[in-house]
Image: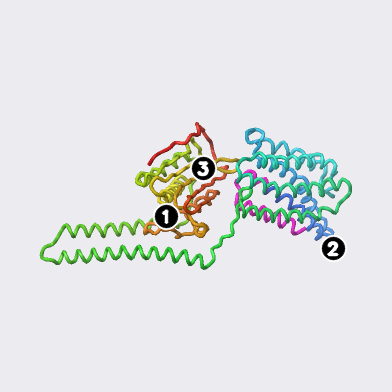
């Protein structure tokens, strides 16, 4: 039984680390945590049997009995609440969501009153099943229905995996730990570790594939050769830029020296060379500031922000470039939506994405911006008709200093910075691209970040740059 509570508590720890603020996640953590007490109780009871000291044996068995009550009574309660919250089917009923945790806890409190721990926890599994069976079955029905009802394909896949993880394990537990014991079949619970192990493997697979219940795991392939390649590329680019600017300064300084030492000083030429020197030093100063701003530790200060306004301000920052290249912008974000985020960082992230998109397109290209909402997240998607990113380069776009642009002013830090900003917000930055077709960037916020909404007619506004 050690494997049972270890797997369950490791799962709970993963969710606590990755997505602790989400209400549905908290109930799932409660399921894993409460269920794990059952396995730990068995371990303690087996340990107590090896003791010769009667007092120690009695005390440890009391602790084990208490852990059994948590597993038998609190876990089904958490399963029901998880189904209610995660399904999203009761989101309209705010009062129900507010008071349901207290209402559905009543049978748990009654069971603790009816069946005390001392001297031994001996509940009637018939009475226990009267409320546990409906709780577990109703929760699983809600999960299955939420999968069927979901229209967003990405969210549907996540819900399907969540249901596949929770439903089989909880139904099996219901049969072996409650219904079977009504008929004095007491040994089937030992197979719980198998179903929990299968559910854990499925959870890991789903977390790597598409994300599940707000958790998306990634195996970072930052091997030594890739890291060296990225750093070498960035260093070479910086070296080339600095060397060019220093060469300019050297030439201008020499020109000034010649002019100063000549019988007839050309003041205009001296001033022009001084201006060139000032431009080079200014450029290198801005370059250092840019690199520092995008590589230092990111600290976010969250406040309630209107995303529509941030998008418009970020678009204005690249307006000259849009007009110069005659880019057609379709801004489909025409209603107010307020998210809890860092306004400054989000504006910079959007500015970088818009700038990348416009630079990747030829004259007359199209830039489309829209908001995509579902029960679990809110996404800002930016689609361009530019040159796209090759399959070979796509896995490296979030690496610092990685850039496909051959320019002294592009250091390959924008997407790396954006990814880190979104991670700090508990969200994600996703990129899909096809060579010579275009790129779609999605800025994904967890739904919990949404504060309020004032929706008007959802009509796209077309702006010709």
In the displayed structure, does residue 270 sit left or right of residue 171?
left
Q: Is residue 5 magenta?
A: yes
The magenta stretch is 1-28
Q: Observer-nearest residue: 28 or 215?
A: 215
- Please tell me which residue lies in front, 287 or 232: 232
Q: Position of residue 95 (x, y in %)?
A: 65, 33
Residue 411 in percent (x, y) is at 41, 58
Label at residue 52: 2
Of 204 and 112, which appears nearest the observer? 204
Q: Which corner quadrant of the image does residue 241 belong to? A: bottom left
**Residue 241 located within the stretch drawn in magenta:** no
Counting every numbered tag in the picture gives 3
* Label 2: few (<14), some (14–19) or many (≥20) C-alpha neighbours in 10 Å: few
**Residue 293 numbered mark, or none:** 1
Residue 190 spot, x, y in % from top left: 81, 55
Residue 124 left/right relative to 381: right
Q: Earlier in the sequence, mark 3 or mark 1?
A: 1
> Disc 3 on helix, strand or loop?
strand
Element under disc 1:
helix
Quadrant position of residue 142:
top right
The disc label shown at residue 189, or none: none
Asked whether disc 2 touches disc 1, contact meaning CB atoms under 8 Å apart, the reply is no
Lower sequence index among marks 2 and 3: 2
| Looking at the image, residue 410 lies above or below residue 157 | below
Please state which of the two labelled residues, at mark 2 or mark 1, is closer to the viewer.
1
Q: What is the crowding at mark 1: few (fewer than 14 residues within 10 Å), some, or many (at least 20)?
A: few
| Most common secondary structure along the magenta stretch | helix
Distance of label 2 from label 1 (alpha carbons): 65 Å
Residue tagged by mark 3? 340
Image quarter in which the N terminus is found? bottom right
For this orientation, the residue located farthest to the front is: 436
């Amino acid at each position: 039984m050690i494997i049972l509570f270890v797997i369950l508590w490791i799962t709970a720890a993963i969710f606590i680390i990755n997505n602790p603020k989400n209400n549905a996640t908290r109930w799932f953590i409660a399921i894993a945590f409460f269920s794990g007490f059952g396995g730990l109780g068995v371990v303690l009871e087996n340990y107590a049997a090896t003791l010769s000291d009667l007092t120690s044996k009695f005390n440890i068995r009391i602790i084990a009995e208490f852990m059994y009550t948590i597993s038998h009574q609190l876990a089904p309660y958490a399963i029901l609440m998880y189904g209610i919250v995660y399904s999203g089917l009761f989101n309209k009923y705010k009062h129900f969501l507010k008071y349901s945790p207290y209402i559905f806890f009543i049978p748990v409190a009654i069971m603790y009153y009816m069946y005390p721990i001392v001297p031994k926890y001996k509940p009637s599994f018939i009475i226990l099943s009267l409320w546990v069976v409906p709780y577990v079955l109703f929760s699983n029905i809600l999960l299955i229905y939420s999968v069927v009802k979901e229209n967003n394909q990405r969210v549907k896949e996540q819900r399907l995996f969540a249901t596949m993880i929770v439903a089989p394990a909880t139904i099996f537990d219901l049969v072996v730990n409650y219904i079977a014991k009504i008929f004095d079949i007491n040994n089937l619970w030992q197979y719980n570790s198998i179903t929990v192990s299968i559910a854990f493997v499925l959870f890991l697979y789903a977390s790597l594939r598409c994300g599940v219940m707000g958790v998306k795991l990634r195996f970072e392939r930052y091997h030594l050769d890739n890291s060296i390649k990225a750093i070498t590329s960035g260093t070479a680019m910086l070296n080339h830029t600095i060397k060019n600017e220093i060469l300019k300064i050297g030439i201008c300084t020499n020109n000034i020296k010649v002019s100063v030492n000549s019988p007839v000083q050309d003041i205009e030429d001296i001033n022009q060379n001084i201006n060139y020197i000032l431009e080079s030093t200014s450029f290198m100063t801005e370059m250092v500031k840019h690199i520092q701003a995008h590589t230092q530790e990111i600290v976010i200060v969250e406040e309630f922000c209107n995303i529509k306004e941030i998008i418009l301000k970020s678009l204005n920052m690249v307006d000259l470039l849009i007009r110069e290249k005659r880019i057609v912008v379709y801004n489909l974000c025409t209603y107010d939506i307020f998210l809890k985020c860092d306004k400054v960082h989000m504006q910079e992230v959007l500015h970088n994405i818009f700038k990348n998109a416009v630079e990747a397109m030829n004259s007359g290209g199209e830039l489309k911006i829209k908001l995509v909402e579902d029960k679990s997240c809110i996404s800002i998607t930016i689609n361009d008709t530019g040159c796209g990113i090759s399959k070979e380069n796509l896995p490296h776009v979030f690496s610092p200093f990685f850039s496909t642009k051959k320019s002294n002013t592009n250091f390959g830090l924008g997407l790396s910075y954006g990814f880190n900003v979104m991670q700090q917000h508990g969200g994600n930055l996703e990129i899909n691209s096809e060579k010579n077709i275009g790129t779609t960037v999605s800025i994904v916020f967890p739904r919990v970040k949404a504060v309020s909404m004032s929706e008007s007619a959802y009509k796209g506004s077309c702006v010709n740059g």
